[in-house]
Image: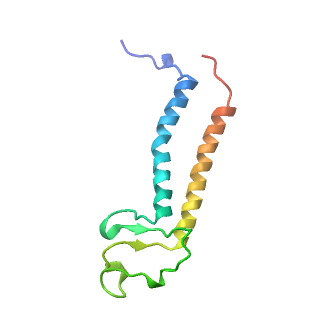
Protein backbone atom coordinates (compact mmCIF):
# COMPACT_ATOMS: atom_id res chain seq x y z
CA UNK A 1 0.00 0.00 0.00
CA UNK A 2 1.32 3.44 -0.90
CA UNK A 3 1.33 6.34 1.54
CA UNK A 4 -1.09 9.14 0.73
CA UNK A 5 0.58 12.55 1.02
CA UNK A 6 -2.60 14.09 2.39
CA UNK A 7 -2.12 12.00 5.55
CA UNK A 8 1.15 13.72 6.50
CA UNK A 9 0.61 15.71 9.67
CA UNK A 10 2.33 18.86 10.77
CA UNK A 11 4.92 18.59 13.55
CA UNK A 12 3.90 19.80 16.97
CA UNK A 13 5.21 23.20 18.08
CA UNK A 14 7.31 21.50 20.76
CA UNK A 15 9.00 19.27 18.19
CA UNK A 16 9.66 22.25 15.94
CA UNK A 17 11.28 24.19 18.79
CA UNK A 18 13.42 21.22 19.84
CA UNK A 19 14.64 20.73 16.24
CA UNK A 20 15.42 24.47 15.98
CA UNK A 21 17.42 24.45 19.23
CA UNK A 22 19.37 21.33 18.22
CA UNK A 23 20.05 22.84 14.79
CA UNK A 24 21.36 26.13 16.16
CA UNK A 25 23.82 24.57 18.65
CA UNK A 26 26.67 24.16 16.08
CA UNK A 27 26.29 27.80 15.04
CA UNK A 28 26.41 28.99 18.66
CA UNK A 29 29.60 26.96 19.18
CA UNK A 30 31.17 28.33 15.99
CA UNK A 31 30.30 31.89 17.03
CA UNK A 32 31.86 31.34 20.45
CA UNK A 33 35.04 29.91 18.92
CA UNK A 34 35.30 32.73 16.36
CA UNK A 35 35.09 35.54 18.92
CA UNK A 36 37.29 33.65 21.42
CA UNK A 37 40.06 33.32 18.84
CA UNK A 38 39.85 37.04 18.05
CA UNK A 39 39.92 37.96 21.75
CA UNK A 40 43.09 35.96 22.46
CA UNK A 41 44.74 36.51 19.06
CA UNK A 42 44.60 32.83 18.09
CA UNK A 43 44.92 31.90 14.44
CA UNK A 44 42.36 30.45 12.06
CA UNK A 45 43.61 27.58 9.94
CA UNK A 46 46.94 25.79 9.89
CA UNK A 47 50.32 26.22 8.24
CA UNK A 48 50.65 28.72 5.41
CA UNK A 49 46.89 29.20 5.26
CA UNK A 50 46.49 30.39 8.85
CA UNK A 51 45.36 33.95 9.49
CA UNK A 52 44.83 36.05 12.56
CA UNK A 53 42.47 38.97 13.04
CA UNK A 54 43.98 41.47 15.48
CA UNK A 55 42.18 41.87 18.79
CA UNK A 56 40.14 45.09 19.02
CA UNK A 57 41.56 45.49 22.54
CA UNK A 58 45.16 45.54 21.28
CA UNK A 59 46.30 49.13 20.67
CA UNK A 60 49.69 48.15 19.30
CA UNK A 61 50.45 48.51 15.62
CA UNK A 62 52.04 45.70 13.67
CA UNK A 63 54.95 47.85 12.46
CA UNK A 64 57.35 45.78 14.56
CA UNK A 65 55.88 42.44 13.49
CA UNK A 66 58.56 39.78 13.14
CA UNK A 67 57.73 37.05 10.63
CA UNK A 68 59.65 33.89 9.88
CA UNK A 69 60.50 33.53 6.20
CA UNK A 70 61.70 35.81 3.44
CA UNK A 71 62.24 39.47 4.32
CA UNK A 72 59.76 41.90 2.74
CA UNK A 73 57.72 39.02 1.32
CA UNK A 74 54.93 38.25 3.81
CA UNK A 75 53.09 35.90 1.44
CA UNK A 76 55.95 33.42 1.51
CA UNK A 77 56.49 33.63 5.25
CA UNK A 78 55.85 30.55 7.28
CA UNK A 79 53.38 31.06 10.07
CA UNK A 80 50.34 33.23 9.81
CA UNK A 81 48.96 36.16 7.87
CA UNK A 82 47.45 39.11 9.74
CA UNK A 83 44.25 40.65 8.45
CA UNK A 84 43.57 44.31 9.03
CA UNK A 85 40.88 45.68 11.30
CA UNK A 86 38.54 45.98 8.31
CA UNK A 87 38.11 42.20 8.49
CA UNK A 88 36.83 42.62 12.03
CA UNK A 89 34.32 45.23 10.85
CA UNK A 90 33.06 42.81 8.19
CA UNK A 91 32.75 40.10 10.85
CA UNK A 92 30.62 42.41 12.99
CA UNK A 93 28.30 43.10 10.04
CA UNK A 94 27.99 39.41 9.10
CA UNK A 95 27.25 38.34 12.67
CA UNK A 96 24.69 41.14 13.01
CA UNK A 97 22.94 39.91 9.85
CA UNK A 98 23.01 36.31 11.12
CA UNK A 99 21.68 37.39 14.52
CA UNK A 100 18.94 39.40 12.84
CA UNK A 101 17.96 36.37 10.76
CA UNK A 102 17.66 34.21 13.87
CA UNK A 103 15.66 36.95 15.61
CA UNK A 104 13.25 37.16 12.67
CA UNK A 105 12.84 33.37 12.65
CA UNK A 106 12.13 33.29 16.39
CA UNK A 107 9.74 36.26 16.14
CA UNK A 108 7.82 34.68 13.27
CA UNK A 109 7.32 31.50 15.30
CA UNK A 110 6.33 33.39 18.45
CA UNK A 111 3.92 35.80 16.70
CA UNK A 112 2.53 33.37 14.14
CA UNK A 113 -0.92 31.84 14.42
CA UNK A 114 -1.16 28.64 16.41
CA UNK A 115 -2.32 25.59 14.53
CA UNK A 116 -4.88 23.31 16.21
CA UNK A 117 -3.43 19.86 16.83
The picture quadrant where one finds residue 97 is bottom right
Residue 42 position, x and y percent, is 42, 64
Please report the residue visible at 54 percent of the width from the left and 72 percent of the height from the top: 58
Residue 40 position, x and y percent, is 47, 63
In the image: residue 8, left or right of residue 102:
left
Residue 35 lies, with reference to residue 78, above or below; the image says above
Q: Residue furthest bottom?
A: 72
Residue 49 position, x and y percent, is 34, 68
**Location of the C terminus (image quadrant):** top right
**Location of the N terminus (image quadrant):** top left
Please report the residue visible at 43 percent of the width from the left and 68 percent of the height from the top: 52
The mark tally for this picture is: 0
Q: Nearer the viewer, residue 85 or 105?
A: 85
In the image: residue 96, left or right of residue 80:
right
Residue 12 lies, with reference to residue 45, above or below; the image says above
Q: How is the image coloured?
A: rainbow
Please report the residue visible at 36 percent of the width from the left and 62 percent of the height from the top: 45
In the image: residue 18, left or right of residue 115:
left
Residue 84 position, x and y percent, is 50, 74
Amino acid sequence: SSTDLSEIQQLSPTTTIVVFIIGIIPFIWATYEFWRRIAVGASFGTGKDSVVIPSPFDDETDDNLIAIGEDNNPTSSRGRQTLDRGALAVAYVLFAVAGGSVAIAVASVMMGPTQPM
